[in-house]
């Protein structure tokens, strides 16, 4: 928010708001926000942690703000990256030109666990594998954004982007009258249109879209149900679908109803017990045959995970150059691959300065933040890396930007990141906003909701 | 050689099931070694589903049967012309990059013994093709053909420890050994025409293919019979392991216990 | 709609109705404990019949053995081991609602979710601070609010029909079982039939169904088994009578059949049940034998539930 002690221009509109809000009112509003979240039922259950399954993600009322110009550049960069990632996926499941050209090592692609042999040779409708690309960004300077990671499978959290905005508008309508904040509520309609635009070859009518959820015990169930409701499509579980003939059908009270596009929120491994894990009860037996023979579209496409692997991540700028012939607008964080002996040596010597992540991990688990760790933690992690170097990558600890955040003592800077959701179908779309996650603990760099992070509304101002 | 195939699989359920979904890899692809002349797969009472050629070049065909049903017959009848290509798979259209087949699955994960077997077998080998031949011999020596000792879930490591197995175990062990040396290898399911007293009599057969970079080709190795596939072999499809390459994958919805009865008859047509 | 969604809606209604029945049983039980033993059978016998009516007697006996008032109250209200306890029913109804959140209005969800959140509060409260009549009343108030929200805010679509199907089916079953248990328990003690004690039992039954006042308005005079049977089985004015429930099911099954342009076996059975009841008089019921008649009715309800599953909820509909 501050630039050499000066309030950065986009936050100017918020200065008066905070200065005139007494602490009591703030507490009252905070309680009101929490009550609203609880009433609408937006909760976040963390796997394996036990405790209250109806836990809320802490919501910080202080918004994150971008100017229109800042956003315009980000938008170009995000769309560019989303296009490159999809081009990569189509390529590596086809002729693999980027591998043949030697621009990415073959083993990173073909020996990757996320590479699905079952979809090799298949190009999904409109050549899109990843229909919702969530790109995690951090800012380190006024014009300096880094991509932390790409999420090409089923990035979660978009319901928070929408609900945070709803709650802010309900609690502080004045702010929205005084600031030219671009709306984000087109997202569900854009998502529905995106999904409908990738209807399969054999669909000859207005496509029926459904969201496939692992079920109501899943921590993101609220989001699945929320999106289905806003898009006006059915929310189905595997048991609600079956394959007959060349198509997938929903079990309804009136008989079978054909489904053309499935926005799945379950992992590849569980999609079809005939093709992947035979013990999966979450999926639909025979689904993959229907998919490959053009009877249904699965979004994101099975196999999309090979593009957001942390080891493949290093090569995304290369993908931008190779497929689009452009220079990448967004930068990657410099990354050391522990699979390479020389880089491993550097990493092990500098653990106290680095952030080390598991290649296939997510959610902030299995990760070491060197500067915030004890000697014992570092030593323990060192042993893990030495045991299986190929499983780790390391990055420098970035001087992440902070955003003003309400804390017990008033307002204080806290580290934030940003996840915008880019939609790819017939068109490529990005609503002006995203999910800002905030590390609520002073000095912490871990923003994951599963690790005690919170969320904020994200504003993009109209110029 | 012209071979005729009659392959009948009968599924019986002790209680009627609500529906059956199957994915078949029962239609042989055409390549230099084989040309299907006439080939038919029928499933009693089925609605034919989607069909497509997968990345490995196999034709996959879905079938669904609407329940309640307590018996299903899958019948394959075909005539195919085969040529001996010394096991080399030529003219077979596929797009999966060979390194993909370096992936290990539960039945093909090499343990210490399999690695040691591989190292010992290839000592002194001149090139990858020679290595592959020696691996086949090594596996055949280490695992005796003895039916009834292993089951569908036996891993390569277990079969080696046991020193006995059937063609599935030989193929898994050969794949595990080849992969441990960095040679891409895969499981092939198919048919084998055997004369009487010709050794392993498994008409529904399986073997392994190993990628030989120098030939730029997959080459078949049948450790169970210590030979490369010839004109007596019909190739149906491939995968990482037996489950992945299974000619019939299916599931029934319901509580009925499934009983399977399979008969395969392969015969050479007099010319 | 998805068969599973219909199933969730149907079960929301069944659980809510069941919670209400359990609350009424609690109220009656509480009352029994305040009255001196009539006929020497003691409240234990009374409680036992109530537990039997709700199908929870066995589970209770396994867990507690002796019927101690306080244990019964815990079992009926709080115990999650008891699938029919009020806590179980409210939690299950709310969980079903969470699954089909988007098929409900904000008001219905609010009513269900508030009931659930308050229940969690009650569970954290010291038992000594809780008063059973207040708990029972809390339950009936909540269930009334939920039903009110359903009736005033929900779209009159097929989902609404499945909710009402659940309500009517559960209610028909509860009324019939409650009557049957009273009758069956008392039958061997022939000397008591027609005595003051018998009369007291019947009044307890009317209280359990929360229709004692309505009954007095409708019939007046002496309480007799015949009048009660007429009221609880054949009187279309009684909100819990079997014929009211059967008519309700016919209404909603007819709507479904029309909306889906598909008549079903469920619809035919419900119609037959209603017609049977319309053709009956208290005399024909007593000629057949009340217990036999109720047994037949409960059996029909079970059949109906099975058909609802087959025709609408199982997902195997063609």
Image (cartoon, rainbow, N blue to C red):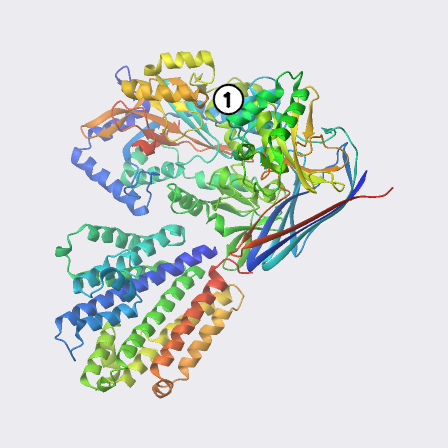
Image coords of residue C311 (percent x, y)? 50, 64
Q: Is residue C56 above or below residue A202?
A: below
Image coords of residue A453 (percent x, y)? 30, 31
Q: The numbered mark 1 sits on a residue in which chain?
A: A
Q: What's the residue at 65%, 57% (across, down)?
A: B45
Specify whether A159 is left or right of B253: left
- Looking at the rendered image, the quarter that the N terminus of chain B falls into is top right
Of the pair C40 and C212, the residue shown nearer to us: C40
At mark 1, the secondary structure is helix
Do we see residue B208 in this rendering? yes
Q: Label 1: which residue? A: A316
- Can you name the residue that lies furthest to the right here? B271
Quarter of the rendering containing residue A223: top left
- Looking at the rendered image, the quarter that the C terminus of chain B falls into is top right
Q: What's the residue at 35%, 13% (across, down)?
A: A350
Q: Is residue C2 above or below residue A343?
A: below
Q: Is residue A454 above or below residue C242?
A: above
Image coords of residue B217 (percent x, y)? 69, 25
Quarter of the rendering containing residue C247: bottom left
Quarter of the rendering containing residue C160: bottom left
Image coords of residue C298 (percent x, y)? 38, 73
Do we see residue A324 in this rendering? no
Specify whether C39 is left or right of B110: left
């Amino acid at each position: 928010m501050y630039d050499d002690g000066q309030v950065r221009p986009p936050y100017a509109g918020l200065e008066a708001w905070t200065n005139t809000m007494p602490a009591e009112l703030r507490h009252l509003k905070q309680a009101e926000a929490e009550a609203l979240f609880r009433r609408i039922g937006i909760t976040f259950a963390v796997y394996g942690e036990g405790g209250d399954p109806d836990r809320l993600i802490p919501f910080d009322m202080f918004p994150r703000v971008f100017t229109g110009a800042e956003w315009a550049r980000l938008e170009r960069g995000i769309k560019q990256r989303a296009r490159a990632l999809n081009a990569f996926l189509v390529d590596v499941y086809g002729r693999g030109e980027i591998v043949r050209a030697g621009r990415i090592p073959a083993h990173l692609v073909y020996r990757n666990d996320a590479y699905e042999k079952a979809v090799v040779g298949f190009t999904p409708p409109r050549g899109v594998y990843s229909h919702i690309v969530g790109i995690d960004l951090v800012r380190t300077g006024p014009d300096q954004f880094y991509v932390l990671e790409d999420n090409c499978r089923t990035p979660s959290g978009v319901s928070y982007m929408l609900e945070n905005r709803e709650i802010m508008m309900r609690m502080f309508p004045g702010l929205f009258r005084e600031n030219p904040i671009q709306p984000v509520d087109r997202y569900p309609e854009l998502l529905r249109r995106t999904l409908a635009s990738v209807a399969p070859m054999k669909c000859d009518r207005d496509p029926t879209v459904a969201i496939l959820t692992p079920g109501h015990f899943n921590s993101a169930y609220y989001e699945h149900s929320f999106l289905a409701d806003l898009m006006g499509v059915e929310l189905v579980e595997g048991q609600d679908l079956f394959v007959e003939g060349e198509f997938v059908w929903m079990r309804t009270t009136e008989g079978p109803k054909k489904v053309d596009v499935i926005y799945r929120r379950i992992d590849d491994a569980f999609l079809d017990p005939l093709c992947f894990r035979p013990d999966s009860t979450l999926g639909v037996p025979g689904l993959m045959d229907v998919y490959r023979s053009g009877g249904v579209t699965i979004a994101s496409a099975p196999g999309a995970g090979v593009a957001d692997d942390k080891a493949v991540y290093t090569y995304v700028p290369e993908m931008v150059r190779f497929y689009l012939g452009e220079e990448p607008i967004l930068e990657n964080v410099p990354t050391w691959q522990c699979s390479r002996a020389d880089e491993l040596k550097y990493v092990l010597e500098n653990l106290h300065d680095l952030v080390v992540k598991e290649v296939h991990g997510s959610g902030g688990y299995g990760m070491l933040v060197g500067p915030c760790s004890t000697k014992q933690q570092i030593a323990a992690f060192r042993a893990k890396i030495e045991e299986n170097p190929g499983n780790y990558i390391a990055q420098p600890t970035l001087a992440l930007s902070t955003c003003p955040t309400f804390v017990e003592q008033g307002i204080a800077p806290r580290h934030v990141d940003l996840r915008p959701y880019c939609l790819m179908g017939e068109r490529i779309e990005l609503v002006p906003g995203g999910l800002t996650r905030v590390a609520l603990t002073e000095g912490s760099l871990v923003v994951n909701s599963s690790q005690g992070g919170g969320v904020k509304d994200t504003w993009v101002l109209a110029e | 050689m012209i071979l005729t195939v009659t392959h009948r699989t009968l599924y019986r359920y002790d209680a009627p099931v609500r529906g059956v979904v199957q994915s078949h890899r029962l239609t042989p692809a055409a390549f230099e070694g084989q040309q299907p002349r006439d080939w038919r797969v029928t499933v009693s009472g089925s609605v034919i589903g989607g069909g497509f050629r997968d990345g490995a070049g196999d034709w996959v065909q879905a079938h669904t049967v609407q329940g309640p049903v307590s018996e299903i017959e899958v019948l394959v009848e075909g005539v195919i012309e085969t040529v001996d290509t010394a096991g080399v798979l030529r003219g077979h259209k596929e797009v999966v990059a060979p390194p993909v087949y370096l992936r290990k699955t539960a039945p093909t994960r090499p343990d210490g013994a399999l690695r040691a077997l591989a190292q010992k077998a290839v000592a002194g080998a001149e090139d990858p093709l020679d290595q592959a031949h020696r691996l086949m011999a090594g596996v055949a020596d280490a695992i005796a053909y003895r039916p009834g000792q292993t089951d569908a879930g036996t891993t390569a490591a277990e079969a080696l420890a046991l020193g006995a197995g059937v063609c599935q175990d030989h193929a898994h062990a050969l794949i595990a050994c080849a992969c441990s040396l960095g040679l891409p290898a895969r499981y092939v399911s198919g048919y084998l025409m055997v004369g009487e007293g010709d050794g392993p009599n498994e008409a529904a057969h399986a073997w392994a293919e190993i990628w030989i970079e120098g030939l730029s080709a997959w080459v078949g190795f049948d450790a169970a019979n210590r030979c490369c596939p010839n004109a007596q072999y019909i190739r149906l499809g491939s995968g990482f392991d037996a489950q992945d390459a299974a000619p019939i994958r299916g599931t029934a919805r319901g509580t009925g216990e499934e009983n399977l009865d399979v008969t395969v008859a392969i015969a050479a047509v007099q010319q | 709609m998805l068969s599973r969604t219909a199933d969730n809606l149907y079960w929301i209604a069944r659980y809510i109705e069941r919670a209400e029945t359990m609350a009424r049983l609690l109220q009656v039980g509480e009352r029994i404990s305040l009255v001196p033993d009539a006929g020497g059978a003691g409240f234990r016998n009374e409680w036992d019949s109530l537990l039997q009516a709700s199908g929870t007697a066995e589970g209770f006996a396994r867990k507690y053995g002796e019927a101690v008032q306080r244990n019964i109250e815990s079992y009926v209200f709080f115990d999650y081991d008891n699938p029919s306890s009020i806590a179980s029913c409210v939690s299950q109804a709310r969980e079903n609602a969470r699954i089909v959140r988007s098929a409900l209005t904000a008001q219905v969800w609010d009513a269900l979710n508030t009931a659930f959140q308050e229940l969690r509060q009650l569970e954290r409260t010291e038992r000594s601070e809780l008063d059973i009549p207040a708990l029972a009343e809390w339950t009936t108030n909540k269930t009334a609010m939920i039903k009110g929200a359903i009736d005033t805010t929900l779209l009159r679509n097929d989902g609404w029909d499945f909710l009402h199907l659940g309500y009517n089916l559960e209610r028909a079953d509860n009324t019939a079982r409650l009557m049957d248990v009273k009758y069956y328990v008392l039958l061997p003690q022939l000397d008591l039939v027609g005595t003051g004690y018998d009369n007291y039992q019947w009044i307890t039954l009317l209280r359990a169904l929360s229709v004692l006042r309505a009954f007095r308005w409708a019939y007046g005079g002496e309480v007799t088994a015949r009048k009660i049977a007429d009221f609880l089985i054949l009187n279309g004015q009684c909100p819990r009578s079997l014929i009211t429930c059967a008519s309700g099911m016919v209404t909603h099954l007819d709507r479904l059949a029309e909306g889906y342009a598909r008549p079903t076996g469920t619809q035919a059975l419900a119609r037959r049940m209603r017609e049977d009841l319309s053709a009956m008089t208290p005399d024909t019921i007593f000629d057949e034998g009340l217990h036999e008649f109720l047994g037949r009715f409960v059996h029909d309800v079970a059949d109906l539930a099975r058909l609802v599953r087959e025709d609408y909820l199982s997902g195997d509909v063609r």
